[in-house]
Amino acid sequence: MKMKEIESILLTFYMNVGMDRPSNHDEILEFVFADVNETADPELWSDSDVAIAFRRWVESKSNGDDYFQVVHKGYQTDLQREQVYVKGGENANIYIIKTEEGFIIDVYGEGDFIDSLTIWNDQLDPCDPDEV
């Protein structure tokens, strides 16, 4: 029962920030459930305890020493596309976008567009080896 309540709260969190249910939801749920059981009042726990546990899960996955950090990967509902957003150091923002024709890689600095690269599907799997 408690596990289902925590799962419902997590699903509401995802929805409120505009994201789909992540593929690692079960891992997140197990972590959050264990954290709430360990740290919150057994009878008087609330969605705030779930939020704190979720924050702890995010922090446990974040390593401040990593230069590249994956901020988001998966389907962006508002943009209607598959996308990976990678933060590179202090200033670089790198987007890898899947299109029907291939991939687009866009790089931004501090809000400024820097460069773009397009890789077409036929470049990845050419019918004729001379096309590459």
Image (cartoon, rainbow, N blue to C red):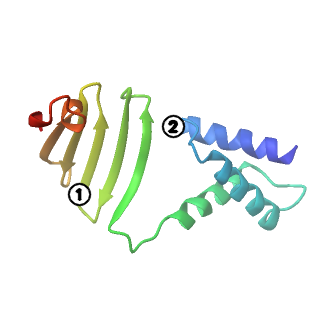
Q: Residue at x 85, y 62 (%)?
A: 41
Q: Amino acid at mark 2?
A: Met
To which quarter of the image does residue 118 belong? top left
Q: Which residue is mark 1?
A: 92
Residue 54 in the image: above or below residue 5: below
In the image, taking residue 85 as reference, residue 18 lies left or right, namely: right
Residue 86 placement, left or right of 108? right
Amino acid type indicated by mark 1: Ala
Q: Residue at x 59, y 48 (%)?
A: 24
Q: Provide residue 2's location: percent of width, then percent of height.
A: 85, 47
Position of the C terminus, as image quadrant, is top left
Residue assigned mark 2: 19
Residue 82 figure quarter? top left
Q: Is residue 49 visible?
A: no
> Percent x, y for residue 71?
41, 52
Q: CA distance from mark 2 to mark 1?
A: 23 Å
Residue 54 rendering spot, x and y as whole percentages: 63, 55
**Sequence order check, earlier mark of 2 and 1:** 2
Q: Position of residue 28 (x, y in %)?
A: 64, 53
